[in-house]
Amino acid sequence: MGVIKDILRTMDYGPSPESTEHVGVWLEEHKSGFGHFINGAFTKPGDLFDVFNPARGERIARVSQGSAKDIDAAVAAARKAQPKWAALSGFERSKHIYALARHVQKRERFLSVLETIDNGKPIRESRDIDIPLVARHFYHHAGWASLIESELPGTKPVGVCGQIIPWNFPLLMLAWKIAPALAAGNTIVLKPAEFTPLTALAFAAICVETGLPPGVVNIVTGDGATGAALVAHAGVDKIAFTGSTEVGRAIRKATAGTGKKLSLELGGKSPFIVFEDADLDSAVEGVVDAIWFNQGQVCCAGSRLLVAEGAADALYAKLRARMANLTIGDPLDKSTDVGAIVAPVQLERIRRLMRQGEEEGLEFFRANDSLPDRGCFYPPTLVTGVDPASVLAREEIFGPVLVATTFRTPDEAVALANNTRYGLAASVWTENVNRALEVAARIKAGVVWINSTNMFDAAAGFGGYRESGFGREGGREGLSEYRIADEPKGKPNSSRPLRLNASPGVGPARNVVDEGPDRTAKLYVGGKQARPDSGYSYAVLDPAGREVGLAGLGNRKDIRNAVEAAAKASSWGAATAHNRAQVLYYVAENLAARADEFTRRLSAMTGASARAAKAEVDASIRRAFVYAGYADKFDGAVHATRSRFVTLAMNEPWGVMGILCPDEAPLLAFVSLVMPAIAMGNCVVAVPSASYPLSATDFYSVLDTSDVPAGVVNIVTGEANVLAKTLAEHDGVDAVWYVGDIEGAAQVEALSAGNLKATWTSAATTDWAKAEGREFLRRATQVKNIWTPYGE
Ligand code: ADP
C-alpha cells in the first residue's frame, strides 16, 4: 500500500517506451544505404551520408547525396509524367491522393516511430499531431483534386514543382507540399532535409504501394547543394520552399528572372501576448505548446512572451512551476514532453545565442538541468526582462527558449509584437473578445491564434507576412500557389529601348533644367504636384518623333519621398470598404467626365487613331467602375477547421505597393494596375509608362477632384527600370508589381530579396482589354488567418 501512496504523491511515471521493432527491421533491410526515388523506383545507393538519431547520437541509416545528375533524372521523370497526370480526371487523381492518405493512416505507428527516431521529437507529438495531420492533408486535398476545375476556373497546373523542406516536421512538411501539388495536377521533385530524410523515403515506398504513376512524385535526398541544384534546374516550373530566411533569400535571388513561380515559408519570431485579464493557467499551458512543442524548433513558435506588467510576476511564477514538471528525455517514451534537438550543430547554435544573452546579463531560468547524458538535449528555458533590442529578442533561436518582456498598454503590446522583421504568427491571450480581435487585426502576421496556439489544419492557409515569406499552404489559399492562368502567353517584351535616351538629341543630353512654370508635367507625391529632385525633365515624343510634352525625370529621392507619403496614408487601408468604393466610383466618374480630353491626349501621344484611343479610354472608365464595385466584395472566408474554432481568413492589403506600368495601353494598363491595388486598401507608388506618361500625369487632376486622400496614389515619371530598382530595394515597400521587359523583371525579383517583398512580374505583352478580375485582388492582398475559439 505504501508504494501506491508514494506513487500518488509523486505522480512519477515509470518508463513507457514505444516499440521500435518494425522500424528496426526496415532500417536493417536498408543497411547498405537508401537510393533516391526516381520515376517510381529506388535508385542504387550512391555517395552516402549518415543519418543520426539525435537522442542517442547513433547512426541509424545511410542516405544518398543527390547530385545534379540525380536532380536531372528526377526532373526528367517528373516532366514526362506531368501531362498524363494532369490529363487524368479529377476523380482519378483524387483516388490516388485518397489512397496515399489511407496508407499513411494504416502506417501511423510505423511513421511516428521513424519520425521520432530520426528527428528527436517526442513520440506523443509525432503520434498525436504530426502523422494524423499528414493523413488529414492528403484527405483534404484528395477532395480538391476533383473540385479544382470548377473551383479555380481559368487556371491550369504549373507543371513540375521543386519542393524543399526542413527537418522540424519532416513528413508533415512533405504532406503540406506534395498533397496540394498533386491535387492541382503537378508532378514533383522533393528534397527532404539532410538531417531527417527517412520518413520521406518511407513515403516513397507508400507511393509504390498505392500505385501512384511513376514520375509523379520523385524524392532526391541530399544537403543544401542538392537543393540548390533543384532550384537552378531549368526544367522546374515552381519552387516551394520552407526553411530559413537566409536560404529563402538565396532562392529568391537564384530564381529571379527565370519565370519560376515561388512560394517561401520562412523564419519567425512570433509574439505570445498575455493581457492582464487573460486566464493565466490556460496561458501557461499555451506557452508550453507555443515554445516547448517540438523543442521550440517550430517556425511559428511563440518565442517572444509579451506580458502585461500587472500580470508578469504571477505568470512567471506559474510558468516556473509548470516548467519544473516538464519531462525531458527519451523521445520514444510516451510520457516525455521535451525530446532532443535535431543535431549537434543546432544545439551549438542555441548555446552560442544563449552565451550572447548571458553576456548581456540576462536572467535565465532553466527547467531542469538533469538532462540525459548522451544525445542532443537542451532544457526548456525562460529568459525574463529582455530588452527588445537584445539578440535573444531579435534572432530566431529555434530552440526551447522563451524570452519575456513586459508591456503597459495594448498599443505598446502591438508595437512590441510588430517590432520584428518577421511576421509568421502571433498568439493573443485575453478574455476580452473586442480587444483580442482588435489586436489580431493590428498584428502583422499571417496567422493569429486567440487564446490558443500552434493550431493547424489542412483547410486553413498558413504562411507569413514580411520576412517570413509569401504564399500560403493549406486550403484554397494554398492551392492557388500550384495553378497558373490558363491563357496563351503574350510575346516576350524585348528589352525596352529607353525612349528618353533613344532619339538623337533626346534624353539626358537634351534634358533641360526645368525653368519655372512651364508645360512640364510634374510628379505627384503626397497629393501634391512636385518638381523632380533632379530638376530635369524629358521630352515625350509621338511615334513620329515630335515632342508632345515634357515629363519630370524622377530619381531615387523622388521614389523615397513617394514611399514616405504612401506610408503616411496607411489609414486608407483601415477605411471601410464602402468608403473606398465611393472614392473609386468618384474617380471613375471624373475620368468619364473628361473622356474626350484623355482620348485626345492618347491619340497625340501614341499616334493611335481617334477610335482606338476612345476605345482605350472607355475601357479604362469601365475598369475603374469594376474595381469600385469590387472594393467591398473581395470577401475573406471562414474556414471549416477544428470544432469549436472559427478560423477567419481576412484579406488584408500589403501596405505600400510599387507599381511599374508598361508602355502598352498607357492609360488602360495604369488604371488596370492601380485601381485594384487601392481598392484593396494599399497605398501606391506608381511609375507610368516611360514613353507615354502624360495620360497618367493628367490623371492627377482626376485624383485631386475625387477625394482620394493625399498619399494613396503617388506618381513618379522617369525611366522605369531605374525607378523599379529603388522600389524593389526599398524596405518600406511591401509588394511590387512590374510589367516591362525581362531584365527589369529579373532585377525586381532579385532586389526584392532584401526584405522579401512579394513581387508579381510580367515581361510579356498583355491583352489589357481582358486584364481584370479577382486575380488582381488576390495579388493586391495577403491573407491573415485568425483562429478564435468559442465555448467555455
Ligand atoms: P533550417 O535552418 O531549418 O535548417 P535551412 O534553410 O538551412 O533551414 O534548410 C531547409 C532546407 O533547405 C533543407 O532541406 C536544406 O537542405 C535546404 N537548403 C539549404 N541550403 C540550400 C540552398 N542554398 N538551396 C536550396 N536548398 C537549400
Image (cartoon, helix red, strand yellow):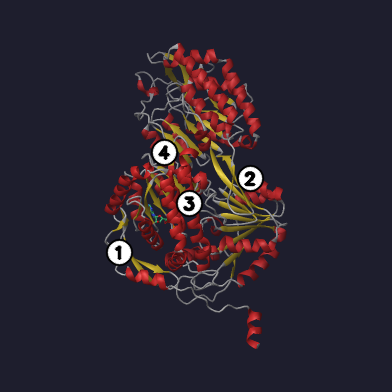
- For the residue pair 224 and 484, the one nearer the viewer reads as 484
Closer to the observer: label 1 or label 4? 4
Residue at disc 2, secondary structure: helix
Q: Is residue 173 left or right of residue 414?
A: left
Q: Which mark is residue 156?
A: 4
**Disc 1 and disc 4: Cα gap in Å?**
38 Å
Residue occupied by mark 1: 48
Instruction: Look at label 4 and name its amino acid.
Output: Lys
Residue at disc 1, secondary structure: strand
Q: Is mark 2 within 8 Å of ligand 1?
A: no
Q: Are marks 3 and 2 in contact (CB under 8 Å)?
A: no
Residue occupied by mark 3: 266
- For the residue pair 713 and 223, the one nearer the viewer reads as 223
Residue occupied by mark 2: 441
Q: Residue at x 30, y 57 (%)?
A: 41
Residue 377 in percent (x, y) is at: 49, 70
**Disc 1 and disc 2: Cα gap in Å?**
49 Å
Residue 108 in percent (x, y) is at: 47, 64
Of pointers 1 and 4, the one earlier in the residue sequence: 1
